[in-house]
Image (cartoon, coloured by chain):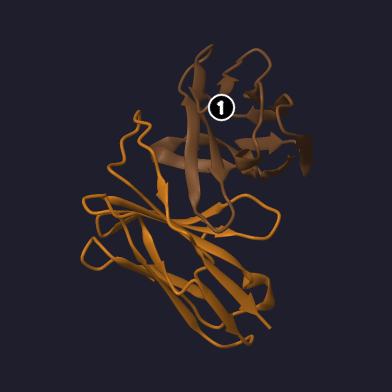
Amino acid sequence: GDSVTQMEGPVTLSEEAFLTINCTYTATGYPSLFWYVQYPGEGLQLLLKATKADDKGSNKGFEATYRKETTSFHLEKGSVQVSDSAVYFCALRYNFNKFYFGSGTKLNVKP
Amino acid sequence: EAGVAQSPRYKIIEKRQSVAFWCNPISGHATLYWYQQILGQGPKLLIQFQNNGVVDDSQLPKDRFSAERLKGVDSTLKIQPAKLEDSAVYLCASSLVQLRDSSYEQYFGPGTRLTVT
């Protein structure tokens, strides 16, 4: 069945470091892919999305490219800030707008 | 615009007791979702409504969980009787419409943290 696997955390970085959070998926057909972010004490928010192969989603300095050949959707940011500390979820959308979520990766950014 | 509202934010109950959660989606959002998020895991869909009809409840443990959305707006999720393994955060989300090829964003509420002792 469809599933999402993302790297375990926590990931601890210093401010201005480069970030990569790996996400791979298993799916039949051609799903849409998403990254959601959950800041402390808040609900999940959509960070970025890509709906077809080779699409690049971007928002707030974060980017992810839909790679069909490697079934991946890795999240990257060139220079993280303390305010980026949160839990990041990779997600796969399948029939009728339903989602599979990865287990989440906690990011801690130290000043 | 107001976001998805949920209450209560926290609830502690003993096993075998019952509990209910309430969700008010964003105005005009036809689709409503309930998710269960166990600590250290991603959200898992329990039930999806389109207006007041159920679209998918295949992962809802129907022997103890029930949900309704009678007027196509607010929704309640009930657990009766609760088990220890029901300890989790229960998330409500809504989106504008459910179409096969759409990718309408889901908007999440802050969740209700349930602890069963």
List x then y, in percent, for residue A49: 48, 27
| Relative depth, front residue between B90 and B80 | B90
Viewed as shown, does residue A101 lie left or right of B71?
right
Q: Residue at x 60, y 15 (%)?
A: A68
Instruction: Chain A: give its colour.
Output: brown
List x then y, in percent, for residue A7: 75, 36
Res. B19 visible in picture: yes
> Height in image: A21 above or below B106?
above
> Height in image: B19 above or below A68?
below
Q: Name the secondary structure under disc 1.
A: loop
| Callout 1 amino acid | Thr
Quadrant in which residue A82 is drawn: top right
Q: Quadrant of the C terminus of chain B?
A: bottom right
Q: Residue at x 40, y 39 (%)?
A: A97
Res. B63 visible in picture: no
- Report the residue marked by disc 1: A28
List x then y, in percent, for residue A86: 63, 45
> Height in image: B113 above or below A106?
below
Counting the numbered discs, the total is: 1
- Label 1 crowd bin: few (<14), some (14–19), many (20+), radius 10 Å: few
| Relative depth, front residue between A93 and A42 | A42
Q: Residue at x 77, y 44 (%)?
A: A10
Most distant residue in the front direction: A111
Instruction: Chain B: give its colour.
Output: orange
List x then y, in percent, for residue B63: 52, 74
Give the letter of the chain under mark 1: A
